[in-house]
Image (tube, rainbow, N blue to C red):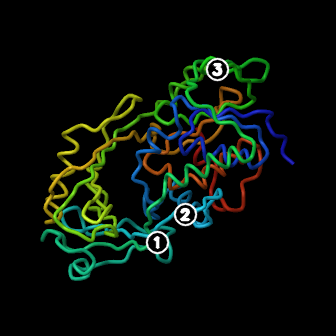
Amino acid sequence: MSEFPDRIAIVGAGIAGASVGARLAAAGANVVLLEAESQPGMHATGRSAAFWQASLGGDTPERQLSLASKPMFDARWPGSEVPLLRKRGAIHLTGPCGEEFPAPGDLAGEDVPVRLDRAALDARIEGLRDHWSGGWWEASCSDIDVAAFHAACLAAVRRHGGEIVTDDELESATRLDGRWVIEAGGRRIEASVLVNAAGAWGDVVAERAGVKPMGLVPKRRTVAQLRVGKSGLRDTPFVTDLHASFYFKGEGDDTVWVCPLDESESPPCDSAPEEIDVATAVDRFEKAIDWPVEAVERKWAGLRTFAPDGRMKFGFDEEADGFFWCVGQGGMGIQTAPAYSLLCANLILKQPLDDALEGISAENFAP
C-alpha cells in the first residue's frame, strides 16, 4: 500500500490538471485544483480541434501513450455519460509532399494506414486538385468530444472529494518543512506535492515556486471555420498533406475546419488568430480542393506548448522536492491524457505503473 501525500495541489484545470486530478482523487488522495481563470479549460483545452490519431507523433513514446489511451476513451473514462470518440477516418494526401507514409512501427489493425490510388481517393472525397497522386487511409482516426471528456474529469475530481478553485492564480509557492505553502488568489494552501499542469504558463509557475524553469516554448496554432459552396460535409474525413502544411475536416453540412499547421512562438497569453494565418489557411485549402469558399465564419487560436527537446514531461523535479512537472504535451495533450494521467498518478503516489501502461517507461518522460 502506498503512503499517500496528505494533500496534492494541482496548478491548472485544463485537461492535463483535470485528468491527473481525476486519477488522484479516485485513488483516495486529497486533491485541490487551482485555476487562474474564471472557468477551467479556457485556453488550449477549450480551443482544441481534437482528434485521436494513432499515427500522430511517429514511432515515439508519445504514440505509446496514444495507443494506451484508446481503450480508456472507448470505456468513457472517467465516467462520461456520452461516447468520447466518434470515428471519422483520416486521409493523408500524397503528391507534392511525398508518396510514402512514415513507417508504421508498432501500429496494427485499422491503425495501419492503407494506400489509396487516385481513383480510390476520388471515391472517398470529391473535388481534390489534380496534383494529388493518391493518399493513405487511416480508418481509426476519431473526433474526441473534448467538452465531454474535460467535464467528466472535473466531475470525477468533485465526486471523489476533490476541490476545484477558480479565479485563483498562483502567486507564490514556498517549500517549508517538507510542505508547499501556496499563496493563490488571496488564500493560503498547504500541500505535500505541487503539480505543475499550467500548460503555456508552466515556466511561470515554476519561477513563482522558486524552481528552475524548463524552457517551455508555447506556439500558436490557428483554426478557421469556412462555409463552402458544397453540402453534406459533416462526416468528411480528416484530410492532410502528410501533416506538411494544412489539414481540414468536415464540421457542419456546408462548413469545414481548416488549419494551416502554423507554429508561431508566443509568450503565454490569451491567444488570438493573426489575419495572415487565417488567410494562409484559406489559400492552402483552395489550392487543395475546388470547394468554393463563401465565408470565414469563425476563427480562433490556441497555444500548444513544447519542452526544448519536444518530448512530453511527467515527473518530479530533481532539484525541487515535491514539485511535479506535467507539461510539454504539444499537440497531443488531449489524445494522450487518459494514459499520461495514469502515469502521473502512479508516479506521484509512488506506485508501480498500472498494467494498462504495459510497455511504457516513465524514464522516457522524465523532466
In the picture, residue 13 is in which quadrant? top right
Look at mark 3 in the image and give the residue it sits on. Answer: 173
CB within 8 Å, label 1 to label 2: yes
Outermost residue on the right side: it is 1
In the drawing, what numbered circle is on residue 277? none
Q: Nearer the viewer, residue 173 or 242?
A: 173
Q: Amino acid at mark 3?
A: Ala
Look at mark 1 in the image and give the residue it sits on. Answer: 111
What residue is rendered at 76% in x and 33% in y? 7
Q: Report whether 32 appears left or right of 101.
A: right
Look at mark 2 in the image and give the residue it sits on. Answer: 67
Q: Amino acid at mark 2?
A: Leu
Q: Nearer the viewer, residue 244 or 7?
A: 7
Residue 315, horizontal then vertical, whole percent? 64, 40
**In what element is the residue under mark 2?**
helix
In the picture, residue 271 is in which quadrant? top left
Tell me which numbered mark, 2 or 3, is placed earlier along the sequence.
2
What residue is rendered at 56% in x and 52% in y? 337
Residue 2, horizontal then vertical, whole percent? 84, 45
Q: Is residue 247 above or below residue 89?
A: above
Disc 1 residue crowd, few under 14, some 14–19, many 20+, Cα 10 Å: some
